[in-house]
Image (cartoon, grey):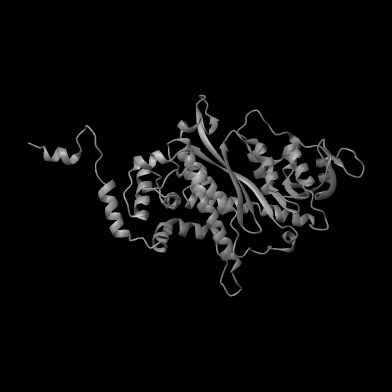
Amino acid sequence: MLAKETGFLRRKARKLTPLLFVQATVLLVSQSVGSFRRWAVLVGVLGQLCLSKQALWERINPRAVAFLQAVLAQVLHRRLARARPAASAALAVFPRVLIQDSTTLKLSPKLATAFPGSRNQCGAAHGQLKIQSLYDLQAQRFVSFSLSGFNRNDQAAAPDVLAVARAGDLVLRDLGYFVLATFQQIAQAGAFFLSRLRLDTNLRDARTGQPLDLLGTLRRQVHLDREVWLGEAQLPVRVVAVKLPEAVAAERRRKAKQNRDQRWRPSARHLALLGWAIFVTNVSRKIWSAKTVAQVYGLRWRIETIFKAWKSHFRLTEVPHGTAAQLEAMIYARLIFVTVFAQTCAEANANFGPAAPAPPSLLQWAGLIGDFFLVLCLEAWQRPLHASFVRQLDYHGRYERRTRKHFGETLMNLS
């Protein structure tokens, strides 16, 4: 049993069973405020009992976090009843298409020690949590998650994919994960990668071995699809460049000039190269044309849509101001929820047929399920809501003991 293995359950539970703990913690995704009182009320409604918020507070420790991590790992490895087939022939040749990306949450300054973030102009540290994720686009399911402070950037997390990637997989990532050594290791593992090119990377023509003047070549050819050696390691790849519309190029240059890092100023060459979408990949021309390279890279935005659903509808940003363990417990519980949600969406898409008016929308599903998730679960688990909630009101809805008189005592003592 996972609860015993992680130390969460040491003796027979009188009130807070492992199942009840997981159910109530996951249901917090339906609450606009992640308070311990609401958490305890959910435990009480589900278990038809009364549990104080203080008792719950004491149970949220590293053992509880380890238990939820173990549950998440088990959910991640749960096989879908029916995996979705590849969307096109361009992806059918890969057993998995792994998108690696991250999202960041702002935290209380009290958590800056556990999850360090950036500093403001006065030098004060902010707490920031970074969630790294790997998502399989073929099966539309998550493969792994990891939590860290903001100071572990995407480049540092780039090698994380090596523990997961298998021969034949395609790894799809944005420019933040551009690390030559990791690309080399992906290729050595028999896997494939597609990334935007970091514009200060050295390129050599694979036929002549001479340095490639990328900007000069693009000014003569407009589009490019050439075999090159990448970086000092001379990793053999294709470089593919597609001319962008002038309005898109102008916006990219504007953002580059307004970079928050005042130490970095884009060169004239860098700004000129922003007129092209430039990619590197070890997928051969026999599999992908240059046009397909750009189209496949555009699929990376699927993970951005998922992150938007998390923050807009699953209240991922509503995190407590308690201890690091309490924060991690809530985050891992919500990752359990979003993992199941992604798998449910994948199954719905797999069952989508030509007679249906339109396929399911991830954002529309997220909005509806986020609002009604609590009611749906209570009905599915056959919990008598009215009587149980009245019991919670009687237990949790009273004044707490304190020296200052509350309103009722003040009213009764009026002379």
Is 187 situated left or right of 135 in this image? right
Q: Residue furthest bottom?
A: 355
For the C terminus, the image quarter is top left
Spot occupied by residue 10 in the image (x, y as percentages of width and height): 45, 43
Front-most of residues 245 and 85: 85
User: Image quadrant of residue 152?
Assistant: top right
Observer-nearest of 292 and 398: 398
Judge whether 324 appears above or below 284 on screen.
above
Quadrant in which residue 48 is drawn:
bottom left
Residue 169, above or below 64: below
What residue lies at 50% left-to-right and 53% top-to-bottom?
337
Q: Residue pushed farthest front? A: 11
Q: What residue is at 73 percent from the left and 57 percent from the top? A: 94
> At 68% from the left edge and 45% from the top edge, which residue is drawn?
163
The image shows residue 44 at horizontal and vertical percentages of: 34, 51
Q: Answer left or right for 169 relative to 230.
A: left
Locate residue 398, reporting x and y percent: 24, 44
